[in-house]
Amino acid sequence: MKRNTGCNSYHGCPPQLSCDKAKTIRVDCDSDSFHPYGNKLKFPVADINVALAEVELQVEVESDIELPTAAREIKHMRRNVSLTQCKAIRSAMDYKKVKLYISGVVHKNIQYVEQCSGMLKDYSVDVPFTCSEAVHVFNYPDYEHLSQKNTVYERRFIDKKGHGADECTSGAFTYEYYNEPIECKLLASFVNDLDLYKDFDNWGRFSRITEKMEVGLFFKLLQKQQVDLDHSHGYKDKEESSSSSSSSSWESDYKMEHEPKNMKHRMDALMKRHEG
């Protein structure tokens, strides 16, 4: 008898044999939209990503780029910004701020020629940068709980004779809290640079580029928090209807002197300024 091994040679169902395909002449689509809905909770609380602030960070970078061969003229230079690290912690000096530790690279693709005519050379290089800054937040991060991992609370027992501690038995009490980290989400970036050509040879070709760059980073600070949905939905109404009681610590903590900048409007303003 021939053993059937077709279903055992795949992790799951075996693929079907392909059939002939018809020629599609026309496809019509139709759609409809419905408002979202959700479960009604007895306690309307959810873990959601809370936007703490939208941050505009300017980084000044100066670097030297050594070309592999001498260049007569730069034909094209492409710039791309990416972050390799974005860490944020609550400031111990000001509870309305967080400390940012940013690292990233400006990837540059340089295309140049060595002579008046000839092949186009292509060279890529990464320009690293690092920056630390304290930024203001409009929604506060959760309070950080510290952990006790060293043996401070020790458990000892009396020995059988009742004359002292039992040296063969001991214990301890330690605890750890697992706090939600503050995350960064890069929204936009720009590079505004000045290139200085240096190290010229006898034929007027240069082999080193000194760059002075203004790198603009636009990113959002997020933290997953447990949010009271009823409270967050009616926050504006509660704030407007609340009387001017300066004794309320909750109101004084969350009162803002001005509205935060909208990131989209900020980017549009920068682009219009550049185009104008």
Image (cartoon, rainbow, N blue to C red):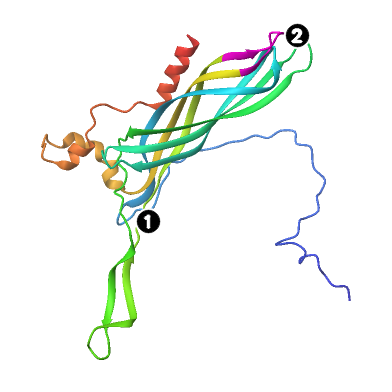
Mark 2 burial class by Cα count in 10 Å: few <14, some 14-19, many 20+? few
**Residue 4 drawn above or below residue 142:** below
Q: Nearer the viewer, residue 140 or 236?
A: 140
**Residue 89 left/right relative to 61:** left
Q: Residue at x 65, y 27 (%)?
A: 124
N-term mark: 1 or 2: 2
Q: Residue 178 — which label?
A: 1
**Residue 30 drawn above or below residue 9:** above
Query: Does the segment drawn in magenta span residue 203?
Result: yes
Q: Main secondary structure of the magenta part?
A: strand
Q: Nearer the viewer, residue 12 or 132?
A: 132
**Residue 81 left/right relative to 267:** right
The boundaries of the magenta stretch are: 196-208
Identify residue type, mark 1: Tyr
Mark 1 burial class by Cα count in 10 Å: few <14, some 14-19, many 20+? few
Q: Is residue 33 visible?
A: no
**Residue 199 left/right relative to 56:** right
Q: Nearer the viewer, residue 180 or 214?
A: 214
Q: Residue 160 — which label?
A: none
Identify residue type, mark 2: Cys
**Residue 94 drawn above or below residue 173:** above
Q: Which residue is mark 2?
A: 116
Query: Does the segment drawn in magenta span residue 230?
Result: no
